[in-house]
Image: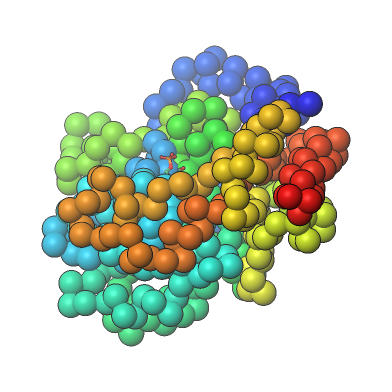
Amino acid sequence: MKVPLVDLSANYLSIKGEIDDAVQEVISTSSFIMGPHVEEFDRRWARYCGARFALGVANGTEAVRLAVKACGITDGDEVITVANTFIATTEAIGDNGARPVFVDIHEDSYVMDTEQIARSVTDNTRAIVCVHLYGHPCDMDPIMSLADEKGLMVIEDCAQAHGARYKGRMVGTIGHVGCHSMFPAKILGAFGDAGAVVTDDETIADRVAKYRNHGRVSKYESVVEGCNARLDALQARILIAKLPHLDGWIDARRRLAARYSEHLEDLVRIPTERSFARHPYYMYVIRHERRDDLRDFLADRGISCGIHYPIPLHLQEAYASLGYGSGDLPATELAAKEILSIPLYPELTQEQQDHVIESIAAFTTREVRG
Ligand SMILES: Cc1ncc(COP(=O)(O)O)c(C=O)c1O
């Protein structure tokens, strides 16, 4: 039996009629760039997230980059973040001329260890980019109190955390600005690149609205230098069609995650959901000391897994100039050696899930027998 890590085709087939109609509508109205579909998406995404403003953008990388820029981060500034994330998080900082400063992670939930942030604040620190990795929210209260105390901006990278809640509040609306990726495999994925910025702050919203479309306020009138980071109208319309299904998909992910946890807790280290969190399980990440052997064993049984992420950013060649080395972020580095993302998506069948569970059990029993 084949079990992919994600199955985009199964997701499409589950709502094929709605998607096909949405695509047809955009094509027949020829409204491809900005216009009513993007405006409608912005309204609906703001409402879903409980934010005053949402701005659809070209992808999640642009969402974080424009959010960091709209927060006024610039040359020579320092921005505190984590090294176990996709490189887009730190590109957004570097592209604005600032320097990422890495803190280690909370060992069980894999997100920023809030106790370490205060120690990393210097006179040059201007912001914190917290990443709700795999969908697990960061512990936002201590982050926000420190930010208030030190006058820092807080940017939430919610690329993996659609619908995640912290103490009942939707992530992305707790800091000054939140950023989403709608890359196809994400919890709410487009059929190509897409992303969004959400905020309650009118100035930030106004800046992102201008940056995403060449700084324009009318067709040939630009008030700031922006770029082309517009959300494609076809993707906006597809996301509108998918949005009513999002909560159901998150419930399905949570049910599958609970079933995995029930069957795997004695076999491998399972993910934690801290008491403040409602975790949408973008990824279900287990841990094992012989992770690579386990991954190969599962691959031989037709099960595809992922590693998110195998090389922490502070050890990437791209960031050699920052001067970090092995041993600087012990919890991050150990996790990178042991984590394994196993298949989880709303359409995963019980048969497929049983195959994953039985295969992990077969690996661990074989190990015990030696
Ligand atoms: C944590 C994180 N931030 C940012 C991004 C960038 O999103 P995109 O691929 O849509 O540019 C991703 C995408 O994988 C991500 O996982």
**Residue 187 appears in the picture as rendered:** no
Residue 191, image x, y percentages: 54, 27
- Residue displayed at 78% across by 61% down: 266
State the image quarter where residue 217 is shown. top left
Residue 99, image x, y percentages: 21, 59
- Residue displayed at 43% across by 55% down: 84
Q: For this rendering, which residue is in front, 85 or 269?
A: 269
- Residue displayed at 53% across by 21% down: 26
From this viewpoint, which residue is outermost toward the left? 76
Q: For this rendering, which residue is in front, 370 or 110?
A: 370
- Residue displayed at 17% across by 53% down: 321
From this viewpoint, which residue is outermost toward the top? 28
| In the image: residue 36, left or right of residue 253 | left
**Residue 136 appears in the picture as rendered:** yes
| In the image: residue 193, left or right of residue 284 | left
Residue 152, image x, y percentages: 30, 73
Residue 148, image x, y percentages: 35, 81
From this viewpoint, which residue is outermost toward the front? 370
